[in-house]
Amino acid sequence: MPMEQSGSEESQNFSIHERFKPDIPSIRELECILDSCRMELNHVDEVWSNLYIGDMLIAHDKKELRKLGITHVLNAAHSAWGSKGDQGFYGPEIHYHGIAAEDSTDFNLRMHFYPASKYINKALSVLNGKILVHCVLGKSRSASLVLAYLMIYHHFSLADAVEKIILHRAIFPNRGFLKQLQDLDIELRYKIKLCELL
């Protein structure tokens, strides 16, 4: 059960959100940026050096994954209908991590932003490491986790991370995930401001 915030904590969070909100695009503005992408949705695309977003079809094609040199798989649709993903499926040559996320506006994906980002960063830190982050279609859950990674480890704003990814892949996180990414953006900006004051 989540802890309730005290009145002073709520007002502090409210003031933090209000302070950074003008700089952060609205959900509608983010959706317009996402809509501006004219790319076809492929089975897999490299969106950052050695970091790929893909769908379940590519995730199940071990031969193609070997050709791409994939060493790690992060499945954001673990245990979804039709998903074969687990360590037994990939064997010893590909390291597997699964997150049983639902592509629902009510699903709390934010609780996975930091652990997933840490896993992505660890995979890319390995010599010749290449990671596939996937879900069913490779446009909402997996894309949201990659956006969070760029924000947490490379200090992108949410808008800049979206712009970067859509140069390489058509993505469309659901509105709930966009809101959670907005909150992450506010949190990270606040931490940067706090560091500047110290």
Image (cartoon, rainbow, N blue to C red):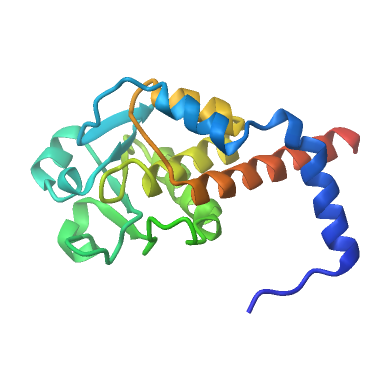
Q: Position of residue 74 (x, y in %)?
A: 34, 51
Q: Position of residue 184 (x, y in %)?
A: 63, 46
Q: Is residue 85 visible?
A: yes
Which residue is at a point 21% across and 31% down the rendered structure image?
42
Q: Is residue 192 visible?
A: no
Q: Is residue 175 left or right of residue 60?
A: right
Q: Position of residue 11 (x, y in %)?
A: 87, 56
Which residue is at a point 58% across and 33% down the rendered structure image?
158
Q: Place residue 104 in its image quadrant.
A: bottom left
23 up-or-down from 77: above or below: above
Q: Position of residue 179 (x, y in %)?
A: 58, 47
Which residue is at a point 39% across and 61% down the rendered structure image?
101
Q: Nearer the viewer, residue 66 or 40?
A: 40
Q: Nearer the viewer, residue 173 or 58?
A: 173
112 up-or-down from 70: above or below: below
Q: Is residue 99 left or right of residue 152?
A: left
Q: Outermost residue, bottom direction?
A: 1
Q: Place residue 131 in its image quadrant.
A: top left
- Where does the N terminus fall, quadrant-wise? bottom right
Q: Is residue 29 left or right of residue 123?
A: right
- Where does the C terminus fall, quadrant-wise? top right
Q: Outermost residue, front direction?
A: 28
